[in-house]
Amino acid sequence: MVKNQIVTVTIEDIGNDGEGIGKVEGYTLFVKGAIIGDVAKVKVLKAKKTYGYAKVEELITPSPDRVTPRCAVSGRCGGCQMQHLSYEKQLAHKADKVKNCLQRIGGLSEEHLAEVMEPIIGMDEPFHYRNKAQYPVGIGRDGKPVMGFYAGHSHNIIDCADCAIQEPVNAVILPVVKAFIEEYGVSAYDEEKGTGLLRHVLTRVGFHTKEVMVCLIINGKKFPKAEILAERVKTAVEEFGLNADTSCRYTLKSFCLNVNTAKTNVILGNEILPVYGETYITDYIGDIKYQISPLSFYQVNPEQTVKLYNKALEYADLSGGETVWDLYCGIGTISLFLAQKAGQVYGVEIVPQAIEDAKKNAVLNGMTNAEFFAGAAEDVMPAKYRESKGSMRADVICVDPPRKGCEESLLDTIVAMEPERIVYVSCDPATLARDVKYLGEKGYLVKKVCPVDQFAHTGHVETVVLLGNQKTKPDSHIKLSVDMDEFNKVKNGEK
Ligand code: SAH
């Protein structure tokens, strides 16, 4: 295969970035914009020895699972990768991905998986689900400001206010900001030169409270006439709420500035300057209330988060007196959720600000049985275990690590603490499967698996796994084996 070659390919699988995967005489092609079942003429963009990247030139036979994307910019925007695949098939694909990883990397048998895997939990309505948006601001070809989303794998901004997965109220906020900066001649940030004032527009909306936050990320300390803009945004948001189609009472609770003068890809700086209202909004997950600032990590799909946490709570099987550890706890969302049913919960998180938020959220909810520690889980847990001279125990340990999964030193400490149950919440099935395999060798058996879709139209999938202690409660013997070549292939999207 060579660059610019045109070939016909049948798409048989989906890769990690939602791209179609097909084979031509044993050669693997990753095809952007193609989905399982498509037969397409594609043009090779990049050719490696055994695999290459291509784009669709002509759809010969479209897949029966193709749907019309809701977004006009869906082919260009990097936010979604699979809007053109029916939601039902997206879910089936995600469930398969979890199953394949647990089988190939985790070493679980087909029969074991058939027994423990629950159906994937999808969304009732897979649009307008996000409660947080970060719109980059730049200068368009015509010299006018643009705001929207980055195109896939680039920093070109696709101008778009009305995103199909964002909270609908965003669609009225961006045009107000855009018109204002044009009227007052506020400069848009130029990423290459590091000049210009407005870098990003961040919005957050409380799913239950409909409280709205707008935060302008600026390359400076002052934003001209910010109060006037805040007033205009407030009017737009409230009028939108009165509109008969939405009939939600949106209120602008916070309009603030975030100072970021560094020439970096990191979106937010540390300093927040209030302009109107508070510097946080309030929202609920189940019965627990949280205050969320521009800097807080907070799950972005509230409808699915409560389903995910309820699954974690179900697997934790708490009856009231248990000691529970919640590792990688963020702002303590899972910790407080579990604390409703546990004796004592301890949370560990690497970002100190998140731990401050977690402590505040415990107070906000009058919960006294949750304690939080700042630090890396793989440092804090082994250190605490050593300090306790090996006497530290837990009934349930919950982990929710970032994509790279857990360090072995942490898994060893978890095993040494002999919890009855481990609840593993994961955003990456490959590292989940690797860790499940490791825990399996140390006596923890997979009892339940439930994929949850938190990010419709993207390739991401969240999974909750329950592992039970085999030493105290032995179960049927399950053969485990792992092949690292298989692991790396799946991880690199080659499988
Ligand atoms: N459980 C939380 C957050 C999950 S995201 C929730 O549901 O909202 C993963 C979290 O792990 C992030 O908050 C991240 O800051 C934190 N993190 C990353 N590496 C870590 C480490 N080595 N030790 C502890 N926390 C870590």
Image (tube, rainbow, N blue to C red):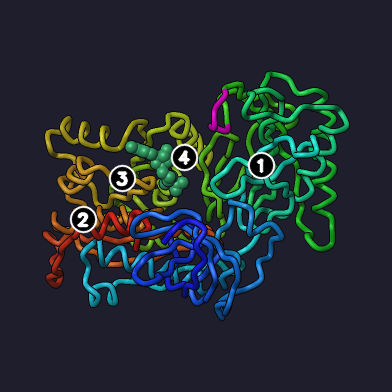
The part of the chain drawn in magenta is: 263-267
Name which of mark 3 and mark 4 comes first in the sequence: 3
Q: Position of residue 6 (x, y in %)?
A: 52, 66
Name which of mark 3 and mark 1 comes first in the sequence: 1
Ligand 1 has an atom within 8 Å of the beta carbon of the residue at disc 4:
yes
Q: Position of residue 408 (x, y in %)?
A: 21, 44
Tell us which disc is closer to us: 1 or 4: 1
- 462, above or below 405, in the image: below
Q: Nearer the viewer, residue 425 or 320?
A: 425
Residue bearing the label numbered 2: 484
Q: Position of residue 153 (x, y in %)?
A: 54, 46
Name which of mark 1 and mark 2 comes first in the sequence: 1
Residue 490 visible from this viewpoint: yes
Type of the residue with mark 1: Tyr
Residue bearing the label numbered 3: 325
Type of the residue with mark 4: Ile
Other-residue count near label 4 (Cα within 10 Å), few / some / many at <14 / 14–19 / ≥20: many
Residue bearing the label numbered 1: 135
Type of the residue with mark 3: Trp
Quarter residue 93 falls in: bottom left
As helix, strand or loop, the secondary structure at mark 1 comes to: strand
